[in-house]
Image (tube, rainbow, N blue to C red):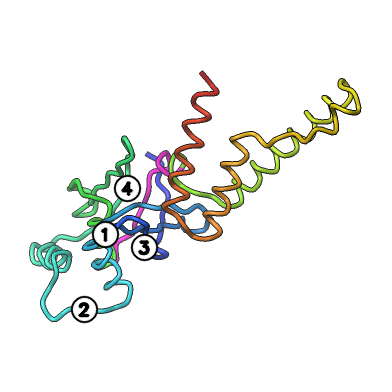
Amino acid sequence: MNKVRVEVVGIAATESNGAYALILKEVGGERRLPIIIGAFEAQAIALELEGMHPQRPMTHDLLKNVIEALESNLAEVCVHDLRDGTFYAYLLLEDGEVEVDSRPSDAIALALRCGAPIYVAEEVMKEAALSPSAIEEERDEEADEEEEDFLERLKRHSAEESRTPQPKNQLQRLQQQLQKAIEEEDYERAARIRDEIRRLMQRSSQ
C-alpha cells in the first residue's frame, strides 16, 4: 500500500451542530483531506495542538500512558480506507508488529500525543483529497474545450445563432463552486461538491 505522510493543519467548524472538519495536508504537497469528526475528538486534538494538558488524563492521554506502561510504542497511524463515505484507520504498535483498528479521529489524537507519524493511503488521497491547483487546471482545460467547441459551432451556424450566449455546463459550474469553497476554507461544502462532481462524472461515463 502506497502511503502519503500528512500533518494536521487545523480544525474548522461545520454547519452541522457538533461536527468539525479535521484538515490533513500532505507533507511536501498541496492536497488537503477533510475528515468530519465529533466535538469530543475535535477538542482532544485541539488541546494537543495548543499544548494544553488537563490536570487529569483524558481518554487519549490514558491510551498513551497505557502504551508506555506496557513498554510498547506507537510506530505510526494510517487512514487506509474509505467506504461509503466513512474513513477507516489503524494504529501500528511495536515497530509494526501489532495493528489495531481505529477511527481516524482517535488515531490522530493519539499520534499527536505520542509524536508518531500520520499517513493516508494514496488511494484514499486520490479519491477524497482536495487540490486547489488541480481543480484550477481542470477548470482551465474545460474552459479551453468549451471555447474550441463554441468556435466550431460559430463556423457552422449563422451569425444570429452564434450571438446566442452559451450556458456553462453543470460540471464546470460545480468545479467553480468547489474552487470557491476551497479558497474560503469551507471544507465541508467542498467535500459535498466533490462528491456531486464524482457522481456526475460516473453517470456521464456510463
Residue 13: image tag: 3
In primary-sequence order, the first of circles 4 and 3 is 3
Above or below: residue 75 compared with residue 126 = below
The residues bearing labels 1 and 3 have C-alpha atoms spaced at a distance of 8 Å
**Residue, disc 2:** 53
Q: Read off the magenta span.
A: 115-125
Q: Residue at x 10, y 77 (%)?
A: 56
Q: Position of residue 133 (x, y in %)?
A: 61, 51
Dot 1: element: loop
In which quadrant of the rendered view does residue 204 lie?
A: top right
In primary-sequence order, the first of circles 1 and 4 is 1
In primary-sequence order, the first of circles 2 and 1 is 1
The residues bearing labels 2 and 1 have C-alpha atoms spaced at a distance of 22 Å
Above or below: residue 155 compared with residue 34 = above
Q: Residue at x 56, y 48 (%)?
A: 177
Check disc 1: other Cα within 10 Å, few if <14, some if 14-19, many if 20+.
few
Q: Are marks 1 and 4 in contact (CB under 8 Å)?
A: no
- Residue 122 painted magenta: yes
- Three-letter residue code for mark 4: Val
Q: Residue at x 36, y 63 (%)?
A: 13
**Residue, disc 1:** 18
